[in-house]
Image: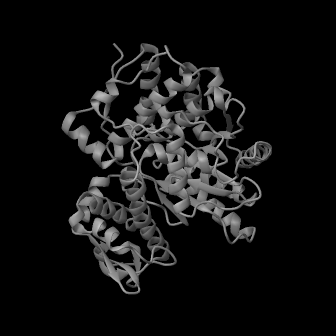
Amino acid sequence: MQYEDRVDALVAPKGALEMLSQDEISRMSEDSGSLHELFRRCALAIMNCGSDTDDAEAVMKEFNDFEINIIQQERGVKLELKNAPGSAFVDGKMISSVREMLFSVLRDIIFTYHEYHLARNLENASSDKITNVVFELLRNANVFRRIQSPDMVVCWGGHSIARHEYDYTKRVGHELGLRELNICTGCGPGAMKGPMKGAAIAHSKQRIHNGVYLGLTEPGIIAAESPNPIVNQLVIMPDIEKRLEAFVRTGHGIVVFPGGAGTAEEILYILGILLHPKNADVPFPLVFTGPKESANYFEQIHAFIGDVLGEAAQQKYRIIIDDEVEVARAMKQGLEEVRHYRKAHHDAFYYNWKLHIPEEFQHPFEPTHENMLGLNLNFNQDTHLLAADLRRAFSSIVAGNVKAQGVAYIKEHGPFHIHGDKLILEKLDALLQAFVAQQRMKLPGSEYIPCYKVITN
């Protein structure tokens, strides 16, 4: 079926954000520069859902004539679109899920600008202050629900995965959905879409009409990982650190599927937190899983964790291969432990206040050559601190791989140089080479040019 390549439209919100102040509109107008461009790029990513590319700059070049403006009317606000991607429309009418997510972007950018950039100075903020900011951003997006028992499973994994791995993520999502569990992912394709798709079918079987498919993203990654259409709650967090904190604060357990540098970053993030002494007794079910063809992938991950972070880190998760039913049962059992713990400690089910997240995992890390040289990738520190700097290294690689700003930086300044303990770097280099060989750094068919150099001599 053929669709128009470009569409002009006037789009009204549905059920939310129907009114904006004149001040908010002026800040989001074309004259406001960077804020309007941020909104434009995120809006284009939303309307380009289903794209088969993770090249953010290529998307921006293809639709360089796309325009979006806010129109304030007596009866509320509308968005004026010019040269929008035709795939977001059916017979000239915007698809409902796209329209909902488009106004979620507007909502989150406005609120973040108000609360995060204007009203607060978070550069030297305490851990508690940042945690409260994450709470307020999620509350503003109406994420929180009053529930009787923990039911939100976060699913992590790569956007660039093989078909058999994608099919397996759907099977796991289906088993989770049959057990009346909800799904939260990074909202993109691949391992982020599969669990939602499987759970949606299972929820239909169970006659669950209010299933939650929560997508958490951030401006730097959204163009490379456009939200999939199953997402029914979308939140744009200000940066990757707050996105990661939102995952572990709203989620009650995590399932990790195969992935690349971004998945390694997520693994190091949660392990670093769970390794902190203050979290020794906090239950947080964590399962690594994939089809039998991906067993070697998790052997590599498990060996890397053992070599670098030690056996204590390996004990924080369970690896289950090619058994979606066992994954769902293990997660269900783990969530029951979470329920007992939260009740005993009078902690909320909708937000994990008790989990301690050190500031090293919260403050934004800007991927530059200078900052990369400042990473302490050595054994002469607490394990959770080593995990924090390893997380930053992988985060920088993600930026250099797919984030528009990071890709542009690498083109101008060359690849990042990663220094540190020789053993750590040898293990890191081996893992990264495996990701490249398995085409986990970019979508299949895309030539991968490394954005990093591991300096082992």
Spot occupied by residue 75 in the image (x, y as percentages of width and height): 41, 86
Q: Is residue 431 above or below residue 224?
A: above
Q: Is residue 355 above or below residue 19?
A: above
Q: Name the residue: 39% across, 53% down.
A: 119
Q: Answer with the quarter of the image where residue 175 lies.
A: bottom right
Q: Name the residue: 40% across, 55% down.
A: 222
Viewer-proximal residue among 203 and 297: 203
Spot occupied by residue 82 in the image (x, y as percentages of width and height): 27, 76
Q: Answer with the quarter of the image where residue 293 lies.
A: top right
Q: Name the residue: 36% across, 49% down.
A: 445
Which residue is farthest front? 119
Q: How many marks?
A: 0
Q: Is residue 138 left or right of residue 115?
A: right
Spot occupied by residue 16 in the image (x, y as percentages of width and height): 49, 74
Q: How is the image coloured?
A: one colour
- Residue 227 appears in the figure: yes
Q: Answer with the quarter of the image where residue 174 lies.
A: bottom right
Query: Which quadrant holds the C terminus?
Result: top left
Q: Is residue 121 left or right of residue 324?
A: left
Viewer-proximal residue among 140 and 87: 140
Spot occupied by residue 276 in the image (x, y as percentages of width and height): 61, 28
Q: Name the residue: 51% across, 50% down.
A: 134
Query: Which quadrant holds the N terminus?
Result: bottom left
Viewer-proximal residue among 416 and 366: 366
- Residue 437 appears in the figure: no
Which residue is farthest bottom? 74
